[in-house]
Image (spheres, rainbow, N blue to C red):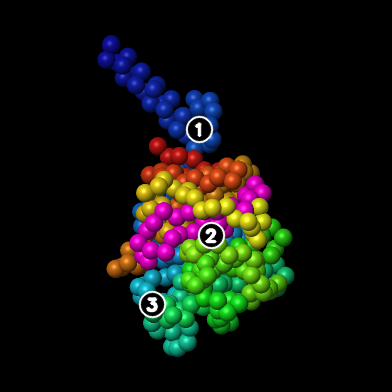
């Protein structure tokens, strides 16, 4: 009889625990925990349709209730193969859609060319998607940006050409679209520093310099609570470092001094910034740090480090979670035990 009581008590405790974990009435407070479909495990290789998900150095854009992730397909290692596009409705499960740009016989997209960090914006005036990317030769001497356009987010992009923005070198790049629709190119200029340059109304060219920061690479920019946050990496090749961020109330500055957002010495959890994704929904806005954990001798196996980024005032902090979950409809995230 005593054993049976213990079993019954254990069943009750287990039921209460399950109710609590699943958001049942036993949980008095706290956010609604995630469903398994929204769980993200940083550093674990991602797949799409049974194949390795190849979207390194990429960015994400939302259209309706669908998210599109466009990045480097590293099938050919450091040489260009394709910029691939994937879709998702929950930011955790992805489906391959199309190779938006592919290897050509010659030119900027030809054999042994460097095409890195593709980012996409939608221009509501021209109704075109505009892709910027780093274009280079194997020695990284050209240091240019390339531009391509498409009427659909994951369509076959038409390559427009490449140039040095305002005549300056450009390697790692990023894009930012402000709330008024104005767009900006973030560009690492090895001679002068990390540049913020304004784009033309059609997003196809650079019109003027906006700000110049210390020389950093892998830039990502967001606007939150009246502050602009610019995240970037020190220059250390494929090796990771403590990435840092700066803040300003205007894109033109003045910008604050650089500071760590991940724990010092963690090398940003052994990753490099590629993008910071705002996820807005019925419950507010969360921010996802997207980083690449590069594997230099086999770039196609490089993994992705996605973690919730905490923004408070003009402070940004990144903590490690073995598992966490994003509710893209609510714009909230939660820990996973």
Q: Is residue 295 at all visible to an observer of this figure? A: yes
In terms of secondary structure, where does tag 2 sit?
strand
The residue indicated by pointer 1 is 23
Secondary element under disc 1, as helix, strand or loop, is: loop
Please report whichever mark, 3 or 1, sits nearer to the chain's N-terminal start: 1
- Could you tell me which residue is drawn at 42 percent across and 27 percent down? 17
Q: Is residue 136 above or below residue 54?
A: below
**Residue highlighted by disc 2:** 220
Find residue 224 and report its horizontal and vertical position in percent: 62, 49
- Camera-near label (2 vs 1) is 2
Q: In the displayed image of the protein, which residue is found farthest to the top?
A: 1
Please tell me whether mark 2 or mark 3 is closer to you in this view: 2
First of labels 2, 3 by sequence position: 3
Q: Is 128 covered by the magenta stretch? A: no
Question: What span is colored magenta in the figure?
Answer: 220-248
Q: Quadrant of the C terminus?
A: top left
Residue at 50% across, 27% down:
27
At x 53%, y 59%, the residue is 220
Between residue 26 and residue 286, name the one nearer to us.
286
Indicate which disc, 2 or 1, sits on the residue closer to the N terminus: 1
Q: Quadrant of the N terminus?
A: top left
Q: Distance from label 3 to label 1 (Cα)? A: 48 Å
Using the image, tell me which numbered label, if any, was put on residue 79.
Answer: 3
């Amino acid at each position: 009889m005593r054993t049976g009581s213990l079993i019954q008590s254990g069943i009750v405790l287990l039921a209460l625990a399950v109710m609590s974990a699943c958001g049942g009435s036993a949980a008095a407070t706290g956010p609604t925990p995630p469903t398994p479909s929204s769980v993200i495990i940083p550093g674990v290789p991602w797949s799409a349709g049974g194949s390795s998900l190849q979207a390194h150095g990429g960015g994400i854009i939302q259209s309706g209730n669908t998210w599109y992730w466009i990045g480097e397909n590293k099938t050919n290692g450091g040489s260009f193969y394709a910029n691939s596009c994937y879709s998702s409705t929950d930011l955790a499960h992805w489906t391959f859609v199309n190779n938006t740009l592919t290897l050509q016989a010659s030119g900027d997209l030809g054999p042994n060319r460097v095409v890195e960090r593709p980012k996409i914006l939608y221009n509501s005036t021209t109704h075109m998607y505009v892709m910027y990317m780093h274009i280079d030769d194997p020695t990284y001497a050209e240091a240019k940006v390339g531009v391509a356009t498409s009427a659909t987010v994951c369509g076959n992009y038409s390559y427009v050409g490449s140039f040095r923005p305002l005549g300056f070198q450009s390697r790692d790049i990023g894009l930012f679209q402000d709330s008024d629709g104005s767009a900006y190119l973030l560009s690492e200029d090895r001679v002068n520093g990390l540049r913020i340059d304004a784009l033309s109304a059609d997003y196809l060219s650079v019109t003027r310099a906006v700000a110049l920061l210390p020389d950093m690479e892998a830039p990502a920019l967001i606007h939150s609570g009246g502050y602009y946050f610019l995240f970037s990496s020190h220059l250390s090749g494929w090796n990771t470092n403590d990435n840092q961020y700066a803040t300003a109330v205007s894109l033109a500055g003045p910008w604050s001094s650089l500071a760590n957002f991940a724990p010092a010495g963690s090398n940003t959890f052994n990753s490099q910034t590629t993008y910071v994704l705002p996820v807005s929904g019925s419950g507010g806005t969360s921010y996802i740090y997207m980083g690449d954990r590069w594997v230099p001798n086999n770039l196609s196996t490089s993994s992705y480090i996605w973690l919730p980024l905490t923004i408070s005032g003009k402070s940004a902090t990144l903590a490690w979670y073995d598992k966490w979950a994003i509710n893209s409809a609510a714009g909230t995230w939660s820990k996973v035990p």
